Each structure stands twice: as structure tokens, then as C-alpha cells.
Image (cartoon, helix red, strand yellow):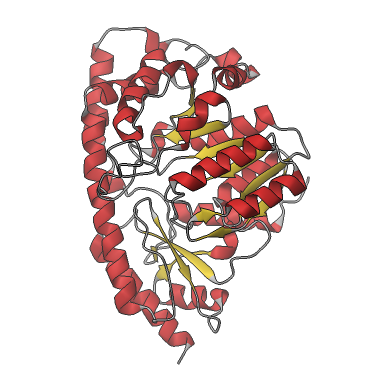
């Protein structure tokens, strides 16, 4: 049996602790929605209406690109957020973003190909890349996200097949690429023959509601999604209902060019099984069409915005002044920089002793870097629990400096 590499084993352990936090420990590393805020009412009503409709097609095999009603409903749902209506014919329905990443990499790369990623990136994507035996090369980032000059240098040096980015409310850094950088990323990748895989899972989670930006082309105040470049074939934009409805739906989408969408639909397991998840597609399409999913998103953004504000206030109150961070405008995460005298491993041990946990920056690095960083999530706990946990983290810092 091939041994599991230590870095993969560590990431699997972190995933396990995300799902089953130790008793008595407030795990601020958990990057998923709290059970209490999941839309049971919305989905129960949509399920009942779907069952009562008498339409048999959700119980049958689906068409390869995915349920047509869902693809249209997704486009209509996204239009006010995106500032344009994505073409339903250029969409492919997925089982969520993890499966989408796996499908895209499996379809578009060969073993030994290069994939560029931000130097701190979604840690479980690294395992998917490893499964496909591609070579992952990190690219420098700053407070504004991936650095275009560093990206251009990496494109010239490594001739990658894919550039994987999380452009909005990045996991783990919380950064959002502005419109200019998005344009630069797409243009540079196209110039060097690479495709951009944009993991846009957090794009709708601005918290609670920014002021409209006249340059964004939409009323959300957000930069244009990278889906704006999808129809050209330069970008595959990945979206999911895991963060805006419920992770257990295992449902998402890819927006790209018609040609690339056909390549995804032509995979053997898709052709054999038909379109993915047709019953859940029908349920979610109904929740999108009747407006209940949109109403829930508004409530969710308010909840997450309150939790982010609570975490920011608690960090300012309880952490040493030489711990720094940029307050995110949405998403799930704070990305903290530690002072030079604080050892990350020792801090985590002290924090666990105080009853709180986090994710170490090294987890998100291709090469073991980010040792002066840690990620906190505000999605899983209520405001009171967040404040109490951050106070405990402050005590852990005090213990190390005593």
C-alpha cells in the first residue's frame, strides 16, 4: 500500500477535526455553516412542492449538462449579484465545488502538468491536485490577493495548464481581488495558454451589504465575478450551494464556454449516470424560482456580518497589539499575522488548553510556509461564543509571553 504523505495526512486530520470538534473546545477553524442557521424551512417547503408536483423527471436519469430548469434558475438568481445573466447553455451542474475541482482537473490536465495557486490556498484543493499527480506551484499574494507581476513570472517560468484562484473573500486570507487584478489574471493566463479556475464559492457572501460600486457593473458593490469572462473560454467559474443554502445538498455549477462545458459533460461517469443529482436539482430550482432562496441569502448575510463584526471587536479587545489582520468584507475567515516571538505550534497548544482551536497557516501552504499565520472562521458559532473563544485565544497569547 502506498503510504499517505505527511502533509496529506495532516490535512485529512484537520478535515476530521472540522467535522467532530473535541468536547468543550470551541473550534474557530471550522469552515462550514452552523446547523442552527441552515434553511430547513426553505428546503422542506421546496421538497414538498417538488413531490406534490407529480412530475416524474426528477426521479429519472438526467441530461449530461444537468437539469435545464436549475441552470435557468441559477442564471436568474445570479443576475442581480453578477450584473449580467450567465448563459444557462454554458453551465454544467456539479456535486459541489470539491467535485467540480476534481472534475476540471481530471478533464483538463495530465499527470505532470503544472497548476498555479496562491501561496496560501484552500487546503483540501491541494489534496485533489495531488490525486491527479499535477505539480502545484505557489504564486505570491499581498493584501489585495494574487500579485499580477508574480503571476506573470510564474506563467513564464512554469507554463501551467491551470491557474487556480479564490477571487472573492479568499479562503484562508479573506482578500478580494479588485476588478483590475481580475482582468490582469485573466489576460495574463490567456496570453500564456493557461485556463483560470475561479473558485467563487464566497462571492455572494458580502456582509451584510456593501454600498453599490458604479465601476462593478452591478448593484452589489462587489467586483465583477470571474464568471464574467467564462463565455470566452478563458475561465471556469465554480459556484456552489454549500455556502448559500446547505452543504448537504452537494450541488453546484460551472460557468464556462460551451466547448469546455461539453468536455465536462462528456466524462464517462457523467454519460453513464446522466446529469448529476437530478432530484436535488429540482428541489433547489424550486427554491430559487419562488424567491425563498434569495430571502434566505439576505438573512444569512446579516447573520455572518454580525458574527464577523463580533470577531473583529473581540480580536481588538483581547489580542496583543502586534497581532495584525485585515478585516474581511464577507466570506467566512480572518487571517492573522503573528509577531516574530510567537511560535505557531506553541500557540495552538496553549489555545487548546484554554478551550479554543484554529487552523495553522502552514496547513494552507504548498511548501510549508505561512508559519506566522493562522485562520479563524466566524461562520460556525454565534456572536457570544465567538467573543468567548477569542478571549480564550487572548489568554493563550498571554500564557506564552508570561
Looking at the picture, tell me which residue is in the foreground, 381 or 112.
112
Quadrant holding the C terminus: bottom left
Residue at 50% x, 16% y: name it: 65
Percent position of residue 3, x then y: 76, 51
* In this view, 290 is above or below 329: above
Residue 69 lies left or right of residue 173; in this view the side is left
Residue at 48% x, 11% y: name it: 61
Question: Which residue in the rendered view is the most extreme toward the front?
Answer: 215
Quadrant holding the N terminus: top right
Percent position of residue 142, x then y: 53, 61
Looking at the picture, tell me which residue is in the foreground, 257 or 60.
257
Can see residue 181? yes
Looking at the picture, tell me which residue is in the foreground, 357 or 132.
132
Residue 263 image-quadrant placement:
top right
Percent position of residue 348, x then y: 50, 73
Percent position of residue 369, x then y: 63, 65
Residue 153 lies left or right of residue 262; in this view the side is right
Question: Which residue in the rendered view is the most extreme toward the bottom?
Answer: 402
Residue 55 image-quadrant placement:
top left
Residue 192 lies left or right of residue 287; in this view the side is right
* In this view, 9 is above or below 112: below
* In this view, 31 is above or below 201: below
Looking at the picture, tell me which residue is in the foreground, 80 or 17.
80
Residue at 47% x, 89% y: name it: 401
Amino acid at each position: 500500500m502506498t503510504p499517505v504523505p505527511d502533509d496529506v495526512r495532516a490535512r485529512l486530520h484537520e478535515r476530521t477535526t472540522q467535522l467532530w470538534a473535541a468536547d468543550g473546545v470551541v473550534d474557530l477553524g471550522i469552515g462550514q455553516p452552523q446547523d442552527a442557521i441552515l434553511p430547513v424551512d426553505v428546503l422542506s417547503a421546496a421538497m414538498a412542492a417538488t413531490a406534490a408536483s407529480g412530475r416524474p423527471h426528477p426521479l429519472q436519469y438526467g441530461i449530461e449538462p444537468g437539469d435545464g430548469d436549475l441552470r435557468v434558475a441559477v442564471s436568474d438568481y445570479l443576475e442581480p449579484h453578477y450584473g449580467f445573466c450567465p448563459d444557462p447553455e454554458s453551465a454544467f451542474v456539479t456535486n459541489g465545488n470539491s467535485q467540480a475541482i476534481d472534475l476540471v482537473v481530471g478533464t483538463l490536465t495530465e499527470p505532470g502538468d503544472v497548476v498555479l495557486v496562491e501561496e496560501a490556498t484552500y487546503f483540501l484543493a491541494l489534496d485533489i491536485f495531488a490525486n491527479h499527480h499535477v505539480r502545484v506551484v505557489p504564486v505570491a499574494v499581498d493584501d489585495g490577493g494574487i500579485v499580477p507581476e508574480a503571476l506573470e513570472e510564474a506563467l513564464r517560468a512554469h507554463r501551467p495548464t491551470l491557474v487556480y484562484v479564490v477571487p472573492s473573500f479568499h479562503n484562508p486570507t479573506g482578500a478580494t481581488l479588485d476588478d483590475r487584478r481580475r482582468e490582469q489574471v485573466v489576460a495574463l493566463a490567456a496570453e500564456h495558454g493557461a485556463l483560470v479556475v475561479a473558485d467563487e464559492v464566497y462571492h455572494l457572501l458580502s456582509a451584510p451589504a456593501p454600498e453599490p460600486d458604479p465601476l462593478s457593473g452591478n448593484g452589489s458593490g462587489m467586483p465583477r465575478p470571474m464568471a464574467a469572462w467564462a463565455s470566452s473560454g478563458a475561465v471556469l467559474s465554480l459556484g456552489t450551494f454549500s455556502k448559500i443554502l446547505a452543504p448537504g445538498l452537494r450541488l453546484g455549477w460551472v460557468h464556462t464556454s460551451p466547448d469546455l462545458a461539453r468536455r465536462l459533460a462528456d466524462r464517462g461517469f457523467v454519460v453513464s449516470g446522466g446529469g448529476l443529482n437530478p432530484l436535488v436539482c429540482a428541489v433547489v430550482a424550486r427554491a430559487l424560482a419562488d424567491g425563498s432562496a434569495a430571502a434566505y441569502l439576505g438573512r444569512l448575510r446579516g447573520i455572518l456580518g454580525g458574527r464577523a463584526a463580533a470577531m473583529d471587536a473581540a480580536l481588538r479587545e483581547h489580542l496583543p497589539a502586534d497581532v495584525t489582520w485585515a478585516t474581511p468584507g464577507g466570506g467566512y475567515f480572518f487571517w492573522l499575522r503573528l509577531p516574530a516571538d510567537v511560535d505557531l505550534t506553541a500557540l495552538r497548544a496553549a489555545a487548546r488548553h484554554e478551550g479554543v482551536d484554529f487552523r495553522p497557516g502552514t496547513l494552507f501552504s504548498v511548501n510549508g510556509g505561512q508559519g506566522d499565520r493562522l485562520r479563524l472562521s466566524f461562520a460556525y458559532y454565534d456572536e457570544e461564543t465567538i467573543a468567548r473563544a477569542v478571549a480564550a485565544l487572548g489568554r493563550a497569547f498571554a500564557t506564552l509571553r508570561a
